Amino acid sequence: MAKEDFYKILGVEKNASDAELKKSYKSSAMKYHPDRNTDNPEQAEKKFKKAKQAYEILSDPKKRAAYDQFGHAGVEQGMGGGSGGFGGGADFGDIFGDVFGDIFGGGAGGGNRRRSSGQGGSDLRYNLELTLEEAVGGTEASVRVPLKVVCSECKGSGAKKGSSPVTCTSCQGHGQVRMQQGFFSVQQTCPSCKGSGSQIKDPCRPCRGQGRVQDNKTLSVKVPAGVDNGDRIRLAGEGEAGVNGGPSGDLYVQIQVKDHHIFTRDEANLYCEVPISFPTACLGGELEIPTLNGRVKLKIPDETQTGKLFRLRGKGVKPVRGGAVGDLLCKVQIETPVRLTKEQKALLADLKQSLSGGGKKHSPQEHGWTDGVKSFFDKLTG
């Protein structure tokens, strides 16, 4: 009896691309899935195996070339048996995992694939508290981090010194076991070795077979100038050690800046409140203002009102991500004199009397507010 042509089985032309072959194979896998052929599962199995056999040959460039030149005779030795059940060489679970693994992340490979046992270590977070001066100017800080490190006794194997882990007898080292339920083949993590593929018969005493021990690590962290609250510095590979040779996690240093007794920061700008005396506000003067880079002189013009904002350009913060240096904004607050002597009170009384003669000329804001209040009450009573 003549054997079916592989291209016809998959329903493609002889010049079909690899993508077209794969697409047709996926379509056949879905079409002849046992769930969709409960009335005749045996026939569906046969058709599925034909599609699998055809795809195995045509997806291999060398086998496809031999088949195109010599037909079935050119590939018969590598075709394998096609009469076994689903539990044999043409296991449906393996086929389904091979075809659709790319859709679901590629993690459900066939039963003949050994599972990678290495597991990455956890990332860690460390809160680093800085002064405003340290955050703005940059610094180098020493941090002590509690974490799990590779056991020095067993070098991370978990086995007693002089011994080594053995292949898990439940999964034969694959890390996964397959449960057969009718036509369904369910693959799950091996309960005996927890997916590692190996078992420890004689565990290491210091780490109790875990391959890691709790320890403290002291690290030097270079903090760049301009960092702010919430910024994070990533130290690659400085987190917890991996399991079974897996990579170490990362350490994230979270920046927290302490409150400053003079300055408040808003991104690249700094703010501060500057108290000035009543005479200075009236007559003007010069004040010495602190900055993070030293002292500067601030000229106060005469008749300065409380709340006025003075900008000192370039006296703020240079952002860590680049950009222009911010400014220092100084808000003046006029301080009312306290603990006055009789003579001083008399002088202020004389000044008040003198100023009252000028009316709105000397206190425009006060009189403007008073007029506004009077107008408000007139409307209420009117």
Image: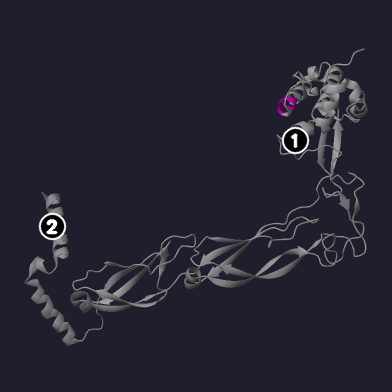
- Classify mark 1: helix, strand or loop: loop
The picture places residue 74, in percent across and down from the top left corner, at 90, 24
Q: Which residue is mark 2?
A: 374
The picture places residue 172, in percent across and down from the top left corner, at 90, 45
Q: Is residue 125 left or right of residue 42?
A: left
Magenta stretch, main secondary structure, is helix
Which of label 1 and label 2 is nearer to you? 1
Give, as a single range, the part of the protein colored magenta: 19-23
Q: How was this image coloured? A: one colour
Question: Toward the viewer: 290 or 59?
Answer: 59
Who's the residue at 79% across and 29% down the image? Answer: 59
The picture places residue 281, in percent across and down from the top left corner, at 22, 74
The picture places residue 300, in percent across and down from the top left corner, at 24, 74
Q: Quadrant of residue 293?
A: bottom left
Who's the residue at 82% across and 37% down the image? Answer: 187
Q: Quadrant of residue 248?
A: bottom right
Disc 1: CA contacts within 10 A as few (<14), some (14-19) or many (>=20): some
Who's the residue at 8% across and 76% down the image? Answer: 354
Query: Do the residues under discs 1 and 2 have CB atoms within 8 angstroms?
Result: no
Q: Is residue 99 in view?
A: yes
Question: Does the magenta-highlighted stretch encompass residue 110?
Answer: no
Mark earlier in primary sequence (1, 2): 1
Q: Which residue is mark 1?
A: 101
Residue 379 numbered mark, or none: none
Task: Give amino acid for label 2.
Answer: Lys
Question: Toward the viewer: 79 or 290?
Answer: 79
